[in-house]
Amino acid sequence: MALSSAELQDLILARRCLENPSLAARISNIVGSPIEKGFEMLPEKWHQVVNDATRKSIEAGLDVALWTMDQNRPETRSSNWWHKLAVGTSGAAGGAFGLAALAIELPVSTTIMLRSIADIARSEGENLATPEARLQCMQVLALGGRATNDDAAETGYFAARAAMARAVSDAAAHLAKKGFADKGAPALIRLIAQIASRFSIVVSEKAAAQAVPVVGAFGGAFINTLFIDHFQDMGKGHFIIRRLERLHGPEEVRRAYLQL
């Protein structure tokens, strides 16, 4: 069944969210200088620090995010501004103490971001009690940073989903049997590693912007607000598409998306 005119407008909104500029481009456009200058200021072995911090943040973040959420309000509007304020506050604290605070600040901001993503998922009709919906919230973190082979609009969003489909499916099957208690299961470790490899790209961009000495506490709050805004866009687009797929099937929605 073809999408209605209202559903096509939703799909247009989803595509606009998912095809927004990268976080690096958004920061550079507003700050007025290329983010590469910040990368030059990062210390050696920084990528390993970022990779470790992102993996630990993802592992810890989702459960904490869902503990604090009322999941019994399906399809009510998500509280995006509240989450922006919370992440901005954590960014201000991190910015005040510089790059050394990333290992402390990132788990906090990631947890708040996952809560915001889950709130968006709930507003689009996802049942957050299911392992599938929870894993889809985690997967949004992988949609915000493109791999080197995601070089076109057609291959960006859907290629990222396709690349992770097996890992998400295996993790969901494990969780359906064992629950979230066994977080050391190979299926979950593989999924978290895939998500972290993409999420760390965006975290590195955030860290590079915060490495500039003039950024400080105000800049840390500002950059963190852009950070969560970027992933709120990814979450909104992703869960609109998931809602439409539940009604019309993945192939029909993908075809309509690529024709926009």
Image (spheres, rainbow, N blue to C red):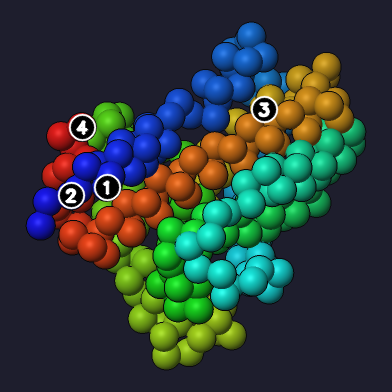
Quadrant where the C terminus is found in the figure: top left
Q: Position of residue 125 (x, y in %)?
A: 42, 65
- Amino acid type of the residue tagged 4 in the rendering: Leu
Q: Residue furthest top?
A: 32
- Marks 1 and 2 in Cβ contact (< 8 Å): yes
Displayed quadrant of residue 204? top right
* Side (left or right) of 135 relative to 230: left
Local SS, label 4 = loop
> Where does label 4 land, which residue?
260
Local SS, label 3 = helix
Displayed quadrant of residue 98? top right
Q: Nearer the viewer, mark 4 or mark 1?
A: 1
Q: Position of residue 245 (x, y in %)?
A: 25, 59
Quadrant where the N terminus is found in the figure: bottom left
Q: Which mark is residue 15?
A: none
Q: Does residue 124 sit above or below 97 in this rendering?
A: below
Whole-angstrom CA distance, mark 3 to mark 4, is 34 Å
Q: Earlier in the sequence, mark 1 or mark 3?
A: 1
- Amino acid type of the residue tagged 1 in the rendering: Glu
Local SS, label 2 = loop
Q: Does residue 171 sit above or below 112 in this rendering?
A: below
Q: Which mark is residue 3?
A: 2
Q: Residue furthest bottom?
A: 177
Rendered residue at 28%/56% (across/down):
244
> Where does label 3 land, which residue?
208
Whole-angstrom CA distance, mark 2 to mark 3, is 42 Å
Q: Position of residue 59 (x, y in %)?
A: 61, 66
Local SS, label 1 = helix
- Amino acid type of the residue tagged 2 in the rendering: Leu
- Amino acid type of the residue tagged 3 in the rendering: Ala
Q: Earlier in the sequence, mark 3 or mark 4?
A: 3
Rendered residue at 50%/78% (across/down):
129
